[in-house]
Amino acid sequence: MPTKVILDVDTGTDDAVALMTAALSPDLELVGATSVNGNTSIEYTTENTLRVFDFIGMPEVPVYRGIDRPLVRMDVKRGMAARIHGDMLDLPPVSNGARLQPGNAVDWLIETYLASSGDIVLCPVGPLTNIAMAIVKEPRILEFIPEIVIMGGAHDHGNITASAEFNIWLDPEAARIVVNCGAPIRMVPLDATHRALVSTDDAARLRALGTPAGEAAARFVLQRIDGYDATQPMPRRGDALAAPVHDALAVCAIIDPSILTTEHIPVDVEVHADLSLGRTVCDFRFRSGKPGNVHFAMDADEPKFNRMLLEILGRSA
Ligand code: RIB
Ligand code: CA
């Protein structure tokens, strides 16, 4: 029986690979996608999400537009995101009938979870604004969310700052609400995604699949490798340049949890500091005296990740 999932995305290049992986995996049933402000503005993250489903021949996947700014922070500069994602993805305009659903993503999340039988995994891979808003507006949805699998956070090192990972940093107040909401949470941070890189050789194998998803994934992986090489070079795989495809790893972790190595620890989010704003504070030694609230991944299986991408993105709608 496929696992039902909802993706909350700030579509960008790795969100796009995550959306295609979730839509094409035989082990998942993608109930819908909700867009949020993040890598670029809500206009682009929404349009990009529609273009992804349209391009792979799955225009029927419902897309709902979400919140266009962080809960509290004003005028946030996106920094390197522009270099790795751009605004409009390199995909053709919608031509297969993909269209935006009426209504706001937050209301759809609430309605969908309250009407569910508690079997829809929630997978946010952008800033947690929509998720926090839904929880605050209707806390009863927490009774219906079996797990939240978040791409976000960092222990050893940040990316947008020395201390913080982009998704958490852009809306730290939202992230703090979500990590403390009480639902089962698995976090896929940079500590895991930076150990599951995709290389130029892997991109060539994706392109050789000859499927729309393989072509698009190759295109986005090469764009990411170029952006990472210019802003935060990653270790090479042999002679091949490589980059993380963060969001797709979170989706693969829903399909096969063994792809991650996790520890159940207390995690909270810094919302008051200057230098460490948005840091996921990981209490590996339980100094706070609190119980674990997050299964935090500190490692990932890179060969398995690349095998899964090839297998899933080699499928067509
Ligand atoms: O820090 C990586 C995360 O920020 C990814 O989700 C990427 O898409 C951006 O949203
Ligand atoms: Ca993202």
Image (cartoon, rainbow, N blue to C red):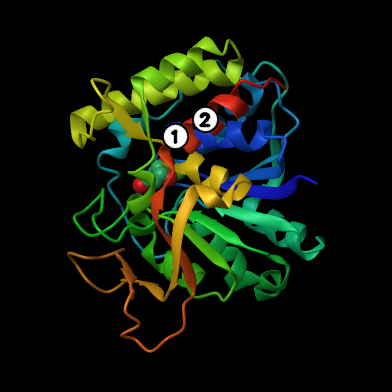
Assess whether mark 1 and mark 2 are in contact (beta carbons under 8 angstroms). Answer: yes
Query: Is the distance from the Cβ of mark 2 to the nearest ligand 1 atom less than 8 Å?
Result: no
SS of the residue under disc 2: helix
Count of numbered marks: 2
In the image, which disc is placed on residue 273?
A: none
- Indicate the position of residue 259 as horizontal and vertical percent values: 50, 47
What residue sits 57% from the left and 76% below the top?
182
Assign the C terminus to one quadrant of the image: top right
Q: Quadrant of residue 130?
A: bottom right
Q: Which residue is mark 1?
A: 303
Q: Which residue is mark 2?
A: 307
The Cα atoms of the two marked residues, 2 and 1, are separated by 6 Å
State the residue in front, 89 or 149: 149
State the residue in front, 79 or 251: 251
Location of ligand 2 given as a quarter of the image: top left
Q: Quadrant of residue 287?
A: bottom left
Q: Measured along the vertical axis of the image, is residue 73 above or below residue 28?
A: below
- Indicate the position of residue 247 as horizontal and vertical percent values: 47, 42
Q: Measured along the vertical axis of the image, is residue 254 above or below residue 131?
A: above
SS of the residue under disc 1: helix
State the residue in front, 44 or 233: 233
Label 1 neighbour load within 10 Å: few <14, some 14-19, many 20+ = few
What residue sits 46% from the left and 49% below the top?
126
What residue sits 65% from the left and 23% below the top?
54
- Indicate the position of residue 288 as horizontal and vertical percent values: 34, 86
129 displayed left or right of 197: right
Residue extending farthest to the bottom is: 289
Q: Amino acid at mark 1?
A: Pro
152 displayed left or right of 15: left
Q: Amino acid at mark 2?
A: Arg
Q: Is residue 188 visible?
A: yes
227 displayed left or right of 303: left
